[in-house]
Image (cartoon, rainbow, N blue to C red):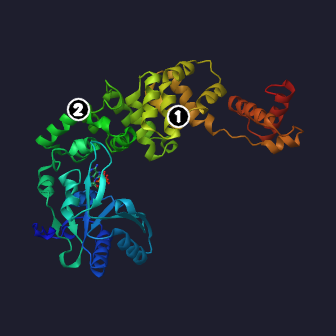
Amino acid sequence: MSPFSSEKRKNPFQYCQGIDKSLTALMRKIGAAADRNGLQAFLIGGLVRDIFLARDLDLWDIDIVIDSDSASFARALARQFDAKVVIYKAFYTASLFVTRGRRIDLSTFRAETYARPGALPQVRKGDFLQDVQRRDFTINALAIALNKKCFGALIDPGQGYADLKQKRIRVFHDKSFCDDPTRILRAVRFEQRLNFRIERHTLQLLKAALKKRKETRVKAPRYFAEFKKILMEEDPLKPLRRLSHLGGLTFIHDPLQLDIRFIRKVYNHRALTGRWKGLVQPEQRWLFYFLAILKGMPERQVRAIVSRFQLSNEEKKAVLQSAGFSATVAYLNNIQLRPHQVYARLEQLTPVTVLFVRMATRRAVVIRHLERYLDQYRHVKLKVDGNDLKQMGIAAGPKIGVILKELLYEKIDHGLKRRSEEMKAVRKIMEGGKGL
Ligand code: ATP
């Protein structure tokens, strides 16, 4: 069946308001290049969905499919755009890194088969229809033709356009969630992000897949990577609540009781928007919601979860430290603590953990210590350094580090302002033999 037999619609690039002009120009160039190479090229996937929904476009994420070898076409485009190209031969895909940070993923029409449920698909060359039907949902399978003679025509064999209009998430076939259970999470994510509904039959299939615990067939880190995308959504509360109602959080721990009020508190907390927001990267924000989900779990369980999902070292550290929340709060809940004691305790924690404890505690004394640490103590820097100490006759070696640490604690407690005051304090530390 020719892909062009579907109803052609108005040129979406013209028809969608607010569409980025440079995107249209780029698509025309790719279409012209496809013409020169005798290929058919289509824009497909999430970007097409968002064009029709007139949403903000994620121009990092441009997916193009072609009817022939994507590697040689990618190389031709790389020469034309002076872009970097990376070829993934085994997957029939290539990525082009063009100006303004745009990445274009090019792939040959593919067909997929699943050796067993949850396994990574086996990929082979296919035709346009197979490439459409291997996708997760009909709304993510709309394609726009890029070749000059049909530029802008919508190709929609899965009736995804009607689903977009009806605000429906629909799978292509009944085995979809068994083949790839990560689609369970994707369905909920798109449903809640777009304010759609998972269509009735699709919802039945999704619930059946959850009931049969199909998600356990997927490697845990891969399933978690898709879950992380939920936590990275602009509003992760809605999909989390929906997933929880569907019983879709048991892959973390069974049973898992979601404290949605607490997660909302974390979501709205000024620590993530106010004066400390620079302490964590925006891409680490998801971690706070994960910590909120795990809050109250025994450390042993948290340890098991962390190792199953293969978090990065920094993430692991934040999660495990936050599992020690009660001990940190108990230590800080002491009005007598000297500033350097607060500093020494909190300096061992990741910034994410410190902020999380600040969000999660209501104890005034603890909050006071935490805020002083965040606003004052952690900014204290010494004016003298190891070289100054060597000039004072202290031999190079670990002793220097010990003295500098003592000095820093002294400065945090007593606010030494001048360099001469720091030198004096060093002499006092040496006389007292403290830390030596
Ligand atoms: P987002 O807006 O969150 O980036 P997206 O639709 O662009 O969403 P991607 O994860 O970037 O999603 O995937 C690009 C396209 O690849 C999807 O639109 C879909 O067509 C296809 N796809 C992605 N994941 C799957 C999957 N698990 N099963 C089938 N098709 C998938």
Residue at mark 2: 212
Name the residue nearer the viewer: 21 or 135: 135
Q: Residue 296 bears which disc, if any?
A: none
Judged left or right of residue 323, residue 418 is right
Q: Is residue 432 left or right of residue 141?
A: right
Name the residue located 27 percent from the left edge and 38 percent from the top edge: 238
Q: Nearer the viewer, residue 226 or 382?
A: 226
Q: Amino acid at mark 2?
A: Lys
Residue 37 visible at all: yes
Query: Which quarter of the image is occupied by the C terminus?
Result: top right
Location of residue 409 (image quadrant) = top right
Q: Which is closer to the viewer, label 1 or label 2?
A: 2
Residue 81 coordinates in the image, percent (x, y): 41, 75
Q: Is residue 384 above or below residue 407?
A: below
Question: Who comes first in sequence, dot 1 or dot 2?
Answer: 2
Q: Tell me if I can see residue 275 in this picture.
A: no
Distance between the alpha carbons at the discs numbered 1 and 2: 33 Å
User: Callout 2 environment at 10 Å: few (<14), some (14 to 19), or many (20+)?
Assistant: few
Secondary-structure class at tag 2: loop
